[in-house]
Amino acid sequence: MKNSVVFLFGLVLFSLLIFSFLFVDRNFLFLNIYSDFIFLHKEITAFIFVILIVSFFAFYFYFIKNQNKISKNQLWKIILISIIISIFSYPAFLSYDIFNYALTAKVAFHYKENPYLLKPIEFIGDSWLPFTRATNKVALYGPLWVLLAGIPYLLSFGNYLMILINLKLLYALFFLGSVFFISRLTPQKREVILFALNPLIIIETFISGHNDITMIFLMLSSLYFFSQKKITIGSLLYVSSIFIKYSSLIALPVYGFIFINSLRKKKIDWPKVFTILFYCMFLVFVLSFIREEIYSWYAIWFLPFGFLSKNKKIVYFCLAFSISLLLGYVPYLLLQSYSKLEIYSKMGIIFLIPLVGYCFMYLKKKL
């Protein structure tokens, strides 16, 4: 593959990095570069976002189509470029969750209090409260995540920007680990490209800084060790994933099946297992609307299993949702509020694009 293509791909990512700094919160005093641009020019902001997302996906599909022209070294080069550029983006570009992770770690390791009992807002006067959202909630994630989040916090030595970078570096380790285990679970390069260069996974992991990649790493690694007949470590890794995010608990029956068949030394149809895991994790993704609303980073729960299923319809379905979920941010960019109109418009975009895509494929096949 030509180096010019890789350069242009890096340029799109760099443009996304620069674009992210238009969203710096006025209360985020660690970066004195606040701008009213996104509020004064909402239509332009949304337009630029769409152009960047479409460009990102254009390169993504190009890489998928030309997978045979990409050497192993080139692929890792592209992956590392994606990580290195994205890590330095302003994280609260599309979500403030990474700020919550940092504040939860501070409650546990600075204030020495239980984040499952005390809310961040109760620490009146804390300098991080003005730019952190949802401070009226206790820790929402498993205890293993609180412990892991403590590592970036402690290694930052009080430097807030360093905490954010450290968190993203932690994600990078789990992301690269996920790529490694996917490459071990399938002999084909295609599944690795589908996962590792997916725009939604890169944006939600390295720009927005969501911790879902940690849970997925543990699930993927557990499946690999089960495939290698290492039942104990495979079981421990799966249980660990539950203590990151409880959503992986829905896969318990599937892991029970894997565990029993591994003990009996029966052959396991892994593509079928991946397909069932896809449906399980997609079900949790859809049901999340009952609790609050569907968030785009929840797709990280089902995308890797969809790509590993080797089912073309499921893969196309995953690609369609990757596009629609990111474009689902457009109503928020236009309205700059979490109103009912924004939520309903977002839901319409999220489900309309996959539906239209499916209908198009159906008609094309029939005609």
Image (cartoon, helix red, strand yellow):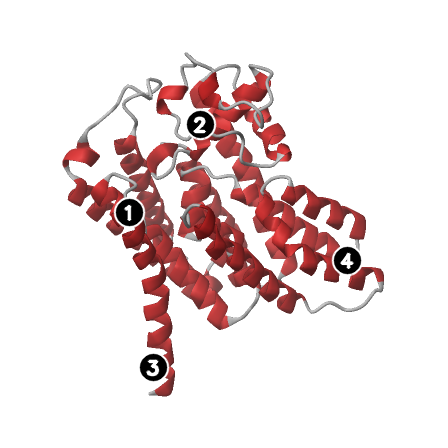
Q: Secondary structure at mark 4?
A: helix
Q: Which mark is residue 136?
A: 2
Q: Residue at x 70, y 57 (%)?
A: 255
x, y percent for residue 18: 29, 35
Which amino acid, by three-letter code, is at mark 2? Answer: Asn
How far apart are labels 1 and 2 at the CA level?
21 Å
How far apart are labels 3 and 1 at the CA level?
34 Å
From the viewer's perspective, tell me whether residue 11 is left or right of residue 289. Answer: left
Query: Considering only order in the chain, which callout, 3 or 2, is on the residue closer to the N terminus?
Result: 2
Q: Quadrant of the N terminus?
A: bottom left
Examine the rendered structure and indicate whether residue 316 appears above or below residue 23. below
Which amino acid, by three-letter code, is at mark 1? Answer: Lys
How far apart are labels 2 and 4 at the CA level?
40 Å
Q: Nearer the viewer, mark 2 or mark 4?
A: 2
Can residue 197 be seen here? Answer: no
Q: Which mark is residue 363?
A: 3
Q: Residue at x 63, y 50 (%)?
A: 249
Q: Which mark is residue 340?
A: 1
Q: Rate crowding at label 1 as few (under 14), some (14 to 19) or many (20 or more) other CA atoms within 10 Å.
A: few
x, y percent for residue 85: 40, 37
Q: Nearer the viewer, mark 1 or mark 4?
A: 1
Query: Considering only order in the chain, which callout, 1 or 3, is on the residue closer to the N terminus?
Result: 1
Which amino acid, by three-letter code, is at mark 3? Answer: Leu
Q: Which mark is residue 259?
A: 4
